[in-house]
Image (spheres, rainbow, N blue to C red):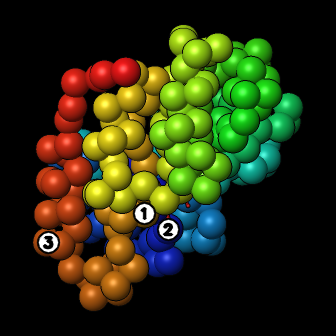
Amino acid sequence: MPVIVVRDAAYAVDLAMALTSGGIRTLEVTLRTSAAFAAIRFIRDAVPDAIVGAGTVLNRAQWERAVDAGAQFGVSPGLTSEVASAARSANLPFLPGVGTATEALRAHDEGFSVQKLFPAEAIGGRSLLKALYGPFPDLRFCPTGGINPENALDYLALPNVVCVGGSWLVPDDAVENRDWLRITRLAQAAAAMRTAPTL
Ligand code: 3PG
């Protein structure tokens, strides 16, 4: 799943089409720029192949604006009771960010059994995911933070990893140069990364 930072909503549709035409349909548009809400709206309206969500959702107000913009899911780098409550009110799929066993347990208790492990590489990466599998065999994770084409397959091979996310699919210089073909090729390579789960 691409973690996207949109600096100008005017290119959001071209970017989304570049990704979907490469086979990557689930797009996380982070709320890290003022263009993000408009970008979500434009993608929702113009790219029916895309499933567009809001990333970096930090509070209830952002959740509500994201829903108004047409977001179809939410992602947060962490979890507070306010964000959990807003996610339940939105009644949309939500990936809360966790980084420890306690946070994973709390997020599970809040009703979320698929979680974003963040920042994955910095906090133990695959070793941490393998360790979490013991006490939490029913939890599933989308690790993000430091994932790239070199290590993505090793993450995807873990039984508790359902997907990975990262910014590598949308390099800043490709966007600056409006090099949509390069982004489609990165998407094609990512979409081809499939592996049978192993322990
Ligand atoms: C995220 O929010 O998931 C990260 O910013 C993505 O991390 P990356 O840039 O290391 O892929």
Secondary structure of the residue carrying tag 1 is helix
Residue at mark 2: 5
Q: Amino acid at mark 3?
A: Leu
Q: Is residue 169 above or below residue 136?
A: below
Tell me what residue is drawn at x 55 percent, y 70 percent. Answer: 35
Left or right, 52 with respect to 198, comes to right
Is residue 75 visible to the viewer in this orientation of the structure? no
Q: Amino acid at mark 2?
A: Val
Residue at mark 3: 181
Place of residue 70 in the rendered image (x, y in percent of width and height, measured from the top left): 50, 44
Which mark sits nearer the N-terminus, 1 or 3?
1
Callouts 1 and 2 close, C-beta under 8 Å: yes
Residue at mark 1: 167
Q: Tell me which corner region of the image, top left, top right, bottom left or bottom right, holds residue 93.
A: top right
| 101, 30: nearer the viewer | 101
Is residue 186 visible to the viewer in this orientation of the structure? yes
The crowding category of the residue bearing disc 3, from other C-alpha atoms within 10 Å (few below 14, some 14 to 19, many at least 20), is some
Place of residue 92 in the rendered image (x, y in percent of width and height, measured from the top left): 56, 27
Tell me what residue is drawn at x 20 percent, y 43 percent. Answer: 193
Tell me what residue is drawn at x 62 percent, y 71 percent. Answer: 34
Left or right, 98 with respect to 45, comes to right
Measure how far apart labels 1 and 3 are at the Cα level.
Answer: 16 Å
Left or right, 99 with respect to 29, comes to right
The crowding category of the residue bearing disc 2, from other C-alpha atoms within 10 Å (few below 14, some 14 to 19, many at least 20), is many
Q: Nearer the viewer, mark 1 or mark 3?
A: 1
Measure how far apart labels 2 and 3 are at the Cα level.
Answer: 18 Å
Left or right, 69 with respect to 16, comes to right
Secondary structure of the residue carrying tag 3 is helix
